[in-house]
Image (tube, rainbow, N blue to C red):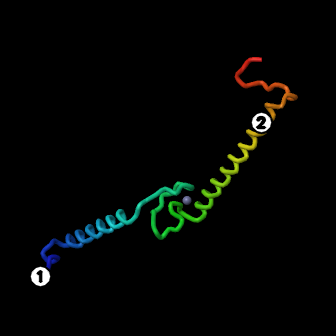
């Protein structure tokens, strides 16, 4: 005589299946923190087994690093241009520039 014998047909299996599902769900929720890949916005598990976290892949990590590198280059180039503009504005031989927003 077991618990299974005392229950209606199928009820025991149903309860066991349900308990198992809850257990699996809890295990997944507690073990896996979900993050969004900064590059492709894909939801990925923040897992120790993923060496590219918080990126989903090496590709996305490289894309993000590349974006930073190109941004740095842009800022550096902009600074050079600003210096050139300053020199030009101080050159007395150049015609006076029209300043945007003022009437001639
Ligand atoms: Zn990605």
Q: Is residue 33 left or right of residue 104?
A: left
Residue 11 x, y percent position in the rendering: 20, 70
Q: Secondary structure at mark 1?
A: loop
Which residue is denoted by mark 1 in the rendering? 1
Q: Quadrant of residue 13?
A: bottom left
In this view, 63 is above or below 81: below
Q: Observer-nearest residue: 3 or 29?
A: 29
Q: Observer-nearest residue: 31 or 78?
A: 78
Q: Secondary structure at mark 2?
A: helix
The residue that appears at 72% across and 25% down in the rendered structure is 100
Residue 97 x, y percent position in the rendering: 79, 26
Residue 63 x, y percent position in the rendering: 62, 58
Residue neighbourhood size for the residue with mark 1, other residues' Cα within 10 Å, grouped as few (<14), some (14–19), many (≥20): few
The residue that appears at 80% across and 31% down in the rendered structure is 90
Which residue is denoted by mark 2 in the rendering? 85
Name, please, the residue furthest toward the right: 93
In this view, 53 is above or below 5: above
């Amino acid at each position: 005589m077991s618990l299974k014998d005392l229950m209606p047909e199928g009820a025991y299996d149903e309860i066991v299946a349900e308990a198992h599902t809850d257990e699996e769900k809890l295990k997944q929720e507690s073990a896996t923190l979900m993050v969004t890949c900064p590059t492709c916005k894909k939801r990925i598990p923040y897992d120790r087994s993923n060496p590219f976290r918080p990126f989903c892949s090496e590709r996305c990590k490289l894309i993000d690093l590349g974006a930073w590198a190109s941004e740095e280059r842009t800022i550096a180039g902009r600074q050079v241009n600003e210096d050139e503009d300053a020199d030009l504005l101080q050159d007395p031989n150049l015609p006076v520039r029209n300043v945007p927003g003022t009437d001639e």
